[in-house]
Image: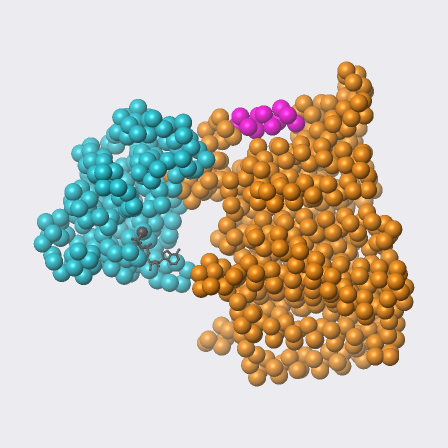
Chain colours: A cyan, B orange
Amino acid sequence: MLEVDAINAYYGDSHILHGVSLSVRPGEVVCLLGRNGAGKTTTILTIMGYLQPRPGRIRYKGRDIAGLPPYALARLGFGFVPQERGIFPSLTVRENLTVFARTGRGGAGSWTLPRIFELFPALQARQRNLGFQLSGGEQQMLSIARALMLNPSLLLLDEPSEGLAPIIVQQIIEVLLRLKREGLAIVLVEQNLSAAFAVGDRHHVMNKGEICFSGSTAQLERDDFVLREYLSV
Amino acid sequence: MELFVAQLLNGLVYGVLLFLMAAGLSLIFGLMNVVSLAHGSFFMLGAYLGLAIFKATGSFWLAFVLAPIPVAGIGIVMELLFLRPLYRRGHMDQVLLTFGFTFVFLDLVQTIWGRAVLHLWAPAGLHGIVHIGLGVFSAYRLFLIGFGFAIALVLWLLLERSRIGAMVRAGVDNAIMAAGLGANIPALFSGIFGFGVALAALGGIAAAPILGLYPGMDSEILIPAFIVIVIGGMGSLRGAFVGSLLIGIVDTFGKAYFQGVALFLIYLAMLAVLLVRPQGLFGIKYSDASVAPAVTTTSRPASLQTRTSELGVLVALLILPFLMGDYPRALVSEIFIFAIFAMSLDLLLGFTGLMSLGHAAFFGLGAYAVAILGTQFELNAWLGVAAGVAIAACGAALIGFFCVRTGGIPFLMLTLAFSQLVFSVALKWRDVTGGSDGLTIAEQPSFFGFSLSRSLVMYFMTLSFFALTYWVLRRLLNAPLGHAFVGIRENEQRMMAVGYPTRAYKLLSFTIAGAIAGLAGGLYAIFNGFISSDAIYWTASGDILIMTMLGGAGTLVGPAIGTALFLLMKNVVSSYSEHWLSIIGAIFICCVMFFSGGLWGAAQKLQWRRVAK
Ligand SMILES: Nc1ncnc2c1ncn2[C@@H]1O[C@H](COP(=O)(O)OP(=O)(O)OP(=O)(O)O)[C@@H](O)[C@H]1O
Ligand SMILES: [Mg+2]
C-alpha cells in the first residue's frame, strides 16, 4: 500500500536521509525506531510531503506520490499525527476535530464525532475547551482523533507516547490496537520499545539517516546487538 | 453636548474606515505573516476605481459594490505572481516587495487621475442631514457607521461560526499542521489576501465622499491602520475592531479639543498599550523573531586584495570631481551623505538582523539639531553636527529601549510608529521646526577654511565623512562586537545560551546606527541648507531601506552602491520620464525577486562561484 524506495532528504544543504526504504501493507503496523536524531521524523515528514525526496520514490496504492504537497496527501487518505501534536490552540476541541474532517471512503472505517467520543471519552467532556487548555495526554488523544476524523487509510504517528504518563501511554496503546483490529494501516514512530512491541508487526531501526535493521517483532526481540547498539536497551 | 456627540460619531466614522483597512491587514498578517505595505495602495485604488465607475455609470452604489472586485483581482495577481515565489524566503522580502508596489501604484494613480484632489459626492439619498436626538448629522456618515458595524458582524460570524472561518483560524494558528490535514494553504493564502484587499478597497470607496481622493491617501490611512493592529494585537479581528474605534475616537477628539497635540495622542495610546501588553490588547500570537532578511555574507577580515581595491576606489573618487561639473559633483556629494545613512541602517539590518522602518527619525534629529541650534542659538554648524550625533544617539537609545524587546515584524512596526512620532513633532512644533515649510540653515560653515559653497569643497567634505564612516564601521564589524552582532542575526537563541546579553547588544547596535544616521542628517542639513518634516516622513525610511537592500544588506559596499544607483536613477530618470517612481519600484521588485541579497550580494556570489571552480 505504501512503498518508500531509497529516499534521500535534506534540510538545506545537510544530507539527513540516506536511501531509506520501507513498505506498509494493508492492515499492517510498521514501527520506525531509533535514537534521538536518527532521522525518524525526517522520514515521516518526507512521506507526508513536507520534504521532497531527492532522489527517491514513494508510491501509495500503486501511484507515484513523491512531489505531491501535504494537503493532497491528506486528501488521498494519509492521517498525520506529528511529534509536537499540532493542536490548534485557539480552536475548541470540537472545532479541532471537525474543521478538516472528511467523510470516509471505501475500506476505511467511517469515523464520526460520536464514535470518536466513544473511543476517547475524555475529549467529549472537554469539547468546548480551547486547544491550549488541554493537558499533554489530552492533546495527544485529540491529535490522533483529529487524524481519524479525516477517515484515513494510512495513519502516520510520530512518537505518540513521548512525554506522557505510563497510564496514558497504556490507553494510547489500546487505542492503536483497536485501530489495528479495524484494519487501519499504521506507520508508528516510537522510542518506547514496549509500545512498539505491543502493536508493531514489523520494525525498522534507524541510525544516522539509514535503516540498519528490518524485521518482525520476534526477530528484533532476539537481536541483542541491534537493541544494544541502536536502541540503548 | 451636541458637539461632543458629533465628535463621537465622527470618531466612529473614522474608526470604521480604519477597521476596513485593519481587518484585512490583520488577517493577512495572522495567516501569512506578511505585513503588506501595499495595503494603503489598495485603499487608494478602491477609491479611484470607484470614482471611475461612478463617472461611467452615474451610480454611486454600483461603484461602491463593484470597485472592490477589480482591486481584489489585482491583489490576487500580486499574491500569485510575486509574493508566492517568496514564501520559502524570509518574510522580510515580502514586506519589501509590497513596498516596491506602493511606488508603482502611486505612479499609476498619478498618471491616470493626476495629482489634484478629486471629489466623489455621497449618493443622492444620503446627501442630507439627519436629526438625531442630540443634533444634526450627515446621513452618509451615519450610514457608514451602520455599514461598518454590519461588516464587522458579518466578518465575525464568518470567522467564528463558519467552517471556512475555522479553517482560516486553524491556518493562523498553525498553517503547516493545517496543510497536513488537507488545507490547501496556497489557495487559502490567495483567498484571504484577495479578501483583505477587497475590504481595503471598500474602505477607500466608502471614505472617498468624506476624505476626497488624492495621491498620498494611501500612506495617510496605512500608518494609523498599522497602529490599530499594533494596539489591537496582530492577527486578531476583535483587536482590529476595538483598536480601530479607539484610534478613530482618540484621534477625532484630539483634533477637536487638543489641537496642538492631537497627532501625538494616537502614538501615546499605542505606547501605553505596548508597555502594558506588548502583544497588543487581543493579541495571542507572538510573531517569531527569527524572520531576518535575506543577507548573503558575513564580514570577513579585509584581505590584501580588498585593501588594494578599496584604495583604488578611493583614488578614483579623489580624481572623479575634477572630471565633472558642479551639478554632478553635488549629486555625488548627496550620494555620499545618503550612503552614510544607508550604511548605518545596514549595521542594524544586515549585520544585526533587525529591520527598521523608522531610521529616518535619527537622520531628522541630526539635521534638525544643525538647523535649530543654528537659527535659535547661532551655533556653528559643525558643533550642530556634533550635537546632532549626540541627540540622535540618545534618541536611538531611548526608542531602541522599547523596540529591541521585539524582533521581526513587531520591531518593524514599532520603529515605524516611533519615527512617525518624531515626524509629527517636527510637523507640529512649527515655532521651532518650521513644520512642513522647514528651516533654512542660517550660515554655511567652512571646511578647513574652504567655503562649502564651492561644489569641490562640498565633494571632498562629504567624501571624507563617507570614507571615515566606512572605515569605522569596517573596524567595528571585524571586532568582537561586530561578530556578536552577526551572531545575533544568525541565531539569537544560541548567542543568549552562550551568555551574551543579546538585548543589550541589540540596543547598542541600534544606538550606534542612530548616531551615524544623525551624522548623515547633520551633513545633509549643511549640504542642502534646508530641512523640512518631509525628510523624515516614513517613506524616507522606506527609501533608505530600499537603497540598502538594492545594493545588498549585510555588506558595507552594498548600501553605498544601492544609494548611488537609487539617487542616480531618481535624478537621471526623473529628468527624462515622469514615471521614475514606477521604474524604481519595478527595478526594486525585480531585485527582491531575483537577487535576494542585493546587487552586490549577487555579484559576490558570482565571484565566489568562479573562485570555487
Ligand atoms: N529543521 C532542521 N534543520 C536542520 N537539521 C535538522 C532539522 N530538523 C532535524 N534536523 C537534523 O536532522 C537529523 C534527524 O532529525 P529527526 O528529527 O528526523 O530525528 P528523530 O529520529 O525524529 O529524533 P527524535 O527522536 O529526537 O524526534 C538530526 O541530526 C537533526 O539535528
Ligand atoms: Mg522525531
Is residue B155 found inside the magenta-colored segment of the image? yes
Q: In this view, does B589 lie to the left or right of B502?
A: right
Residue A96 x %, y %: 39, 33
From this view, report whether residue A99 is shown above or below residue B431.
Answer: above
For the point 79% across and 75% down, the residue is B461
For the point 54% across and 72% down, the residue is B480
For the point 86% across and 71% down, the residue is B445
Residue B98 x %, y %: 62, 49
Quarter assignment of residue B126:
top right
**Residue B258 seen by the camera:** yes
Q: Is residue B447 left or right of residue B611?
A: right
Figure disc tally: 0
The quadrant the N terminus of chain B occupies is: top right
**Residue A7 seen by the camera:** no
From this view, report whether residue B235 is shown above or below residue B544.
Answer: above
For the point 74% across and 26% down, the residue is B9
Residue B563 x %, y %: 69, 65
The quadrant the C terminus of chain B occupies is: bottom left
From this view, report whether residue A143 is shown above or below residue B549.
Answer: above
Is residue B328 found inside the magenta-colored segment of the image? no
Q: In this view, does B33 lie to the left or right of A88?
A: right
From this view, report whether residue B481 is shown above or below residue B514.
Answer: below
Q: Give the range drawn in magenta.
A: B148-158
Q: Which secondary structure class fits the magenta region best?
A: helix
Quarter assignment of residue B235:
top right
Residue A205 x %, y %: 21, 55
